Structures are given as structure tokens and as C-alpha cells.
Image: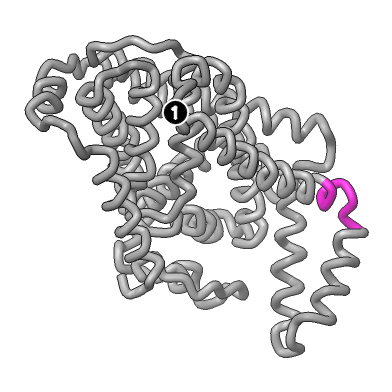
Amino acid sequence: MKRWQFWLGVVISVLLMYLALRGLQLGDVGTALLEASYWWLIPGVAVYFIGVWVRAWRWHYLLRPVKAIPTKTMFPIVAIGYMGNNIYPARAGELLRSVVLKRREQVPVSASLATIIVERVFDGVVMLAFVFLNLPELARLTVDSGFVGNIQTLALWGAAAFIGVLAIFLLAAMFPKITERLIRWFTQRLVPERFREKILAIALRFLGGLESLRSPREALMVFLTSVVIWLLETGKYWFVMHAFNFQVSFFALMLMNGIVNLATTIPSAPGYVGTFDAPGIAVLKAYGVSSAVAASYTLVLHVALWLPITVLGAIYMAKEGIKWGDDLDTMQGSNNQESYGVNPHD
């Protein structure tokens, strides 16, 4: 709570929520919420949890070179991680699930973090693909606004960033000996001697976590799995849409999914408040959905994405014996050699 990044995120969230909701008649939003058929949330949540299971399988697949762990073992840990992302600032859930995996399976945190970063890079590439696939249709709908231009600019910069990082990871995985020599060279010259051995060990374990990308077939499998994951999540958008009085195409919801998830990389209050809602409402308004319906749908969708996985993750976390006030370093255990000094409550 004392970190400036936390308060910056809160300010950004408040500003985006103000921009998204200004001018709305709260009575109209309330009417749309009261008239919604919430039974549609049941299949939406079911499809979402299928996607979480596929995420657990993808993580199992990425971790196989480090340690073969069944998907059923990974699923609760993934749920805990996504709960952490929803509750704690700065996506601390990613580190949380690495720490839980360390506790349960003795997988080095740096190696599992490498696979999580790979997940995030592939997710970013798929999100950008969803955006680029649907930009022509959106441009026809909003030709006189600057909205499409802003999305195009964001997508181009995002594509350069994600594809650049992915290329580095692929090269590092395919040429591990050259990469190891480079790591040793930079560590020897740039890291103070007292930290050198520790940093080198962490970097080499991180490199080991990239081993699943050493063949094009493995990388393609991870990419296709990522596509399936995000199509399933878009399926939840589609089911929840049927609870409200509007219709857009599945491709439009793919675009919305891509944009809101790219926007959630912006600092915000925990739970992606504002960074999810403001762009989601803007996309739907571009497709001709009324402001009140767009706002009510986006807010309900946000809650439906946030609440079930957060509750499930909290249940699994309690079963792990983890308390809300636990520091991540303490959770790793006193015999752990990797120290990160991160407390998700700060």
C-alpha cells in the first residue's frame, strides 16, 4: 500500500472509470442490469474454467523439460496465481504461483517464472492477432473517429514488443550454449562480485525454463494452445452477451477481448479496474451498442471473469495453508536459495 506504483494504478483506474462512465444515465444502466438474463453466466463460467484447465495443461507442457507435473496438480496452482493477479497489485499472482509450485514440487522459482513469461508473451501475440484480424471491420464502423488510429498505434507498438521478446526467447532456447556464454560474459562484467554467483545461477535456471521452445514444433504447440485458451475466453464474452439486449459478432468480441487484455498491462488498481472496463465499453459503442448497455455488459462481464476464479483460488490457497499476510520469501522456506524480496501486500 505504501508503494507509489500502487497509488499510480489507483489514479489511473479512477480516471479511466470516470472517462468510461461520464455522461451515462445511471437509471438506464440500472434498467439494463435488472433486465439481464443472468442464467447465461452459467455456461460462460463453465467455458472459462475449461480455459483455465487448458492454461494448466499449457504450463504443464512448458515445464516438462524441468519436471513432468500432471495437469491436475497444476490446475489449483494456476487458480491461486490468477486469484493473486486479481487481488494483489503488479500481477504478483505470477510470482505467487511460482512460489507455490516451488513449495509443492521443488521447481526452481526462476525456471517456472521463465515459463510464465513465455506464457505471457504468447498470450500477447494472440491478443494482437485478435486485434489485427478485426481492425478492418472496426475501421468501417468508426471511420470518422480517432479510436481506430489509437488501437492501430497500440497494436503496432505491442506487436514489436511481444514479437521481439518472443524472438529473443526462441533464439535463447535454440542456442542454449551460445546464450549461456553470453550470460556468463555479461554477468562477469556487469554484476558486482558478491552477487555474481547468485545472479548467474538464477539466470541459468531461467534459461532452463525456456527449454520447451527449442523446436518449432514445441513453439507451435504452445501458440496453438494459447489460441484455444483465448477463443474459450471469448466464448465467455459471447455467452454473457446473450444475457443483455444486444448482438455483435464473435469476431467483434474477439477484438474486444484482445483490446481489453492488452489494456490490462497498464498499471491499475488490483482487479484491472478501469483498464478492462473503459476500452471494453469503447469497443462496444463503436459497434453501435448503446452506452448504458455497453457499460452494464462490460461491468457484469468483468465481475464474472474476476469473481469465480478469485473464489476458487482463495479456496485452494487456504488448502495450501497460505495466509493472506504471508510474505513470498517466507512461503518459499528458509532453505530456499532464491530470494526475491517481494511482498504482494506492499
Q: In this view, does 115 lie above or below 345?
A: above
Looking at the image, which is closer to me, 139 or 71? Answer: 139
What colour-coding does the image apply?
one colour
Q: Main secondary structure of the magenta part?
A: helix
Quadrant for the N terminus in the image: bottom left
Who's the residue at 86% across and 63% down the image? 180
In this orientation, does residue 221 appear? yes
Q: Is residue 293 left or right of residue 137?
A: left
Quadrant for the C terminus in the image: bottom left
Q: Is residue 241 above or below residue 48?
A: above
For label 1, the residue is: 145
Q: Is residue 243 above or below residue 147?
A: above
Who's the residue at 39% across and 36% down the image? 279
Q: Is residue 5 above or below residue 237?
A: below
Who's the residue at 47% across and 44% down the image? 78
Instruction: Pinpoint residue 293: horizontal percent, then vertical percent.
Output: 23, 22
Q: Which amino acid does label 1 sit on?
A: Ser
Q: Does the magenta stretch include residue 235?
A: no
| Mark 1 residue element | loop
Instruction: Pinpoint residue 32: horizontal percent, then vertical percent.
Output: 15, 20
In this orientation, does residue 319 appear? no
Instruction: Pinpoint residue 221: horizontal percent, then vertical percent.
Output: 71, 29
What is the total number of numbered labels drawn onto the structure image?
A: 1
Who's the residue at 22% across and 27% down the image? 296
Looking at the image, which is closer to me, 336 or 210? Answer: 210
Q: What span is colored magenta in the figure?
A: 171-177
